[in-house]
Image (spheres, grey):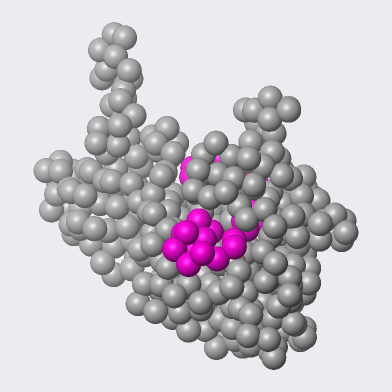
Amino acid sequence: MNEKERIIELSNCFGPSGFEDDVAAFIKKELKEYKPDEDHMRNITVSKESSKSNKRVMIDAHMDEVGLIVQAIKPNGTIRFLNLGGINRSSLPGNSYLIKNNKGEMIPGIVAVKPPHFTKKNEIPSNEIEEMILDVGTSSKKETEALGIGIGSPIVPNVNCLYDEKRKIYFGKAFDDRIGVAVGIEVFKRLEKEKLKVNIYGSFSSQEEVGERGILASANRIKPDVLICLEGCPADDTFQEDYMIQAALRKGVMLRHMDTSMITNHRFQKFAIDIAKKKKIDIQEAVRSGGGTNGAMVNQTLGVPSIVVSVPVRYIHSSYCWVTHEDYEKAVMLVLELVKALDEKTIAQF
Ligand SMILES: [Zn+2]
């Protein structure tokens, strides 16, 4: 499987928070030469302990995507649901979703709000999740249950990833953080024969979108000295004024100095920026007024310097996202150059 096919498959994988099984199985297959380890939260870890140094560099990407979960089935067969993670509510109505039933089959449905034909004059349908329904084309609770749908069934957008070879751009779901997962897999593939000055650990963690839950289990096992967090970050080049654009498509990797969860260790951040400049890898520096990552969790709880290497993704947390192959490739290049350059002395200075 080539990199493009891998990115497409990862985007299509079913894996809302807490239900990352398909993504985990895919990663285990792709990195089988590293003998992946797995815990019961479905966190996957791999290692390349080739160095005499005792320094441990962790590279993490989260496997989960934002999604929905069945809360109740109404007497008329339509479904009430809750969100798994911060899904963009205004992107829900009118879009198609897939529910994984109790046999593991995918059942399609549509999220609906009160149609204009039935709203009163000047009535605007609510975009509260409690007011929306998911309709699987049934007319009774019994019929919906007969499809194998029940309380707790997980749901993701019904989107098949497309790739435009001419423009080298992907159009699909879940690039937060499947593009980070793709970067992580490719980094380990390219590192296979490399001799490094530190030990490298890969972590593909679960449940990030519901409050960075899986990463701690992984970090406690790996006990890293530094963390490189791989993310798909919201591209801001469609609604921001030019001077505020810090994560545009085709402008390279975004390195954040701050978001609402972490002030990045500026010594590690400078090391990364200097390497990017030296190796002529395009980067975009950012100070974010929102957002949070797994980097913050490890930084705060284990006191480990962390940086976040992000690939810009347009319309993150919605059904359809744009991401370019060149930004992905630059993230792979930057992470490879970082792990090749890291050594005991440098890490001690962070
Ligand atoms: Zn993310």
Q: Is residue 260 left or right of residue 166?
A: left
Q: Is residue 264 left or right of residue 253?
A: left
**Of 61 and 6, which appears nearest the observer?**
61
Q: Which corner quadrant holds the C terminus? A: bottom right
**Of 162 and 42, which appears nearest the observer?**
42
Query: Is 119 located above or below residue 213 in the figure?
Result: above
Query: Is 27 located above or below residue 19 in the figure?
Result: below
**Of 30 and 205, which appears nearest the observer?**
205
Count of marks overlaid on the render: 0
Residue 131 image point, x, y percent: 25, 32
Instruction: Decide if residue 179 is in sight here.
Output: no
Residue that appears at 51% across and 39% down: 290
**Rendered image quadrant of residue 195:** bottom right
Residue 220 image point, x, y percent: 44, 75
Residue that appears at 30% across and 32% down: 128
**Of 166 and 137, which appears nearest the observer?**
166
Q: Which corner quadrant holds the N terminus? A: bottom right
Query: Is 231 located above or below residue 59 in the figure?
Result: above
Residue that appears at 59% across and 83% down: 47
Residue 122 image point, x, y percent: 31, 9
Q: Which residues are magenta?
A: 294-322
Is residue 302 covered in magenta?
yes
